[in-house]
Image (spheres, helix red, strand yellow):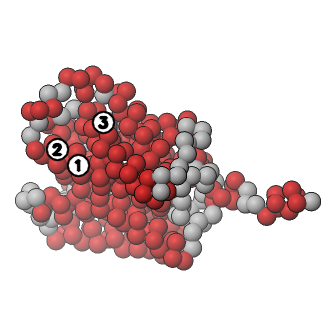
Amino acid sequence: MSQTTESADAPTTQSRLTTHATGRGKLVGHLAMLLFAALVSGSYSIGALAAPHLGPGALNAVRFLVAISVMAAAVALVTRGRFSAPRAPWRYLVLGGLMAVFFVTMFISLRLTDPVSSGAVFTLMPLMSAVFGYFLLGQVPRPIVIASLIFAALGSVWVIFDGDIEAIRTFEIGRGEMIFLIGVAAHALYSPMVKKLNDGGEPLVAFTLWTMMGTGLCVAVYAAGEIVETDWSSLPPIVWLCIGYLAVFTGAGTTFLIQYGAMRLPAAKVMAYTYLSPSFIIVYEGLLGHGWASPSVAAGALVTVLGLLVLALARDG
């Protein structure tokens, strides 16, 4: 009798995958993704300064070594040292492999193109994530969510091409953009996979740590040759600044934020915040002295923000 009652009361796997937070939990999920977009965008501008000096695999291997150390300390603090070895470790290799593909292809792309162009490819992620969310989790975005994604995408494209219609019309995908497109697809798949593979058995900080370890392992295997061949003592300060930023903010920080958001929001809404990347990148590039955007580009950024605002307020499907 008790077994029947427990079974009836327990949420099914499908309901766990398709339900989302409400109220304050939903608001905090959106704020987490806003911070995620700001931090990730900074990695393009900083990464572009460091990319010529260090191979993408070696750079990411070191940043994850530092990030894992930071996250391990956080986990030890939160759990007071009481956390066990992960169950089903293969889950973290799957998630880590997806993120490893994203980070490595990002820095390969930054060697072949500019930060804003890479940010342009990054904005393809929300629609990809919506497709993956449908097939993996059964999430069907409401029409207003789809419309908001398209509206925000139009504003993002306008920002990316500096409000130049001719530049949009003659757009051609270069080698760097094509390589990063593979990484973007991997990242888009990552968001729904987090929700599918997180069974709720581990604290979120521990789940984040194991995922980062999976990413670091995959990157290290890929970059073994680069790591050995790199003359670490001769690297300029900008490389170490980049590694520090990537490790703390876009390593431990954004891995936690995206998993936090993915457990509270639909996949399409989680990844929709990537539409803010070109706007953030333009601001960062201006602050770095690389020039400011024109008023028409600022208008495109406003369109993107309005689209995201509608999306954030839309009821989950």
Which residue in the protein does label 1 denote?
244
| Residue situated in front as seen by the camera: 79 or 192 | 79
- Disc 2 element: helix
Which residue in the protein does label 2 denote?
240
Between discs 3 and 1, the one toward the N terminus: 3
**Percent x, y of residue 82:** 52, 52
Q: Are marks 2 and 1 in contact (CB under 8 Å)?
A: yes
**Percent x, y of residue 195:** 56, 53
Amino acid bearing label 1: Gly
The image quadrant where one finds the C terminus is: bottom right
Between discs 3 and 2, the one toward the N terminus: 3
Q: Residue 107 falls in which quadrant of the image?
A: top left
- Disc 1 element: helix
Q: In the rendered image, is residue 162 in sight?
A: yes
**Percent x, y of residue 53:** 13, 36
| Residue situated in front as seen by the camera: 184 or 104 | 104
| Apparent side of residue 84 relative to residue 221 in the rendered image (left or right) | right
Q: CA distance from mark 3 to mark 2?
A: 13 Å
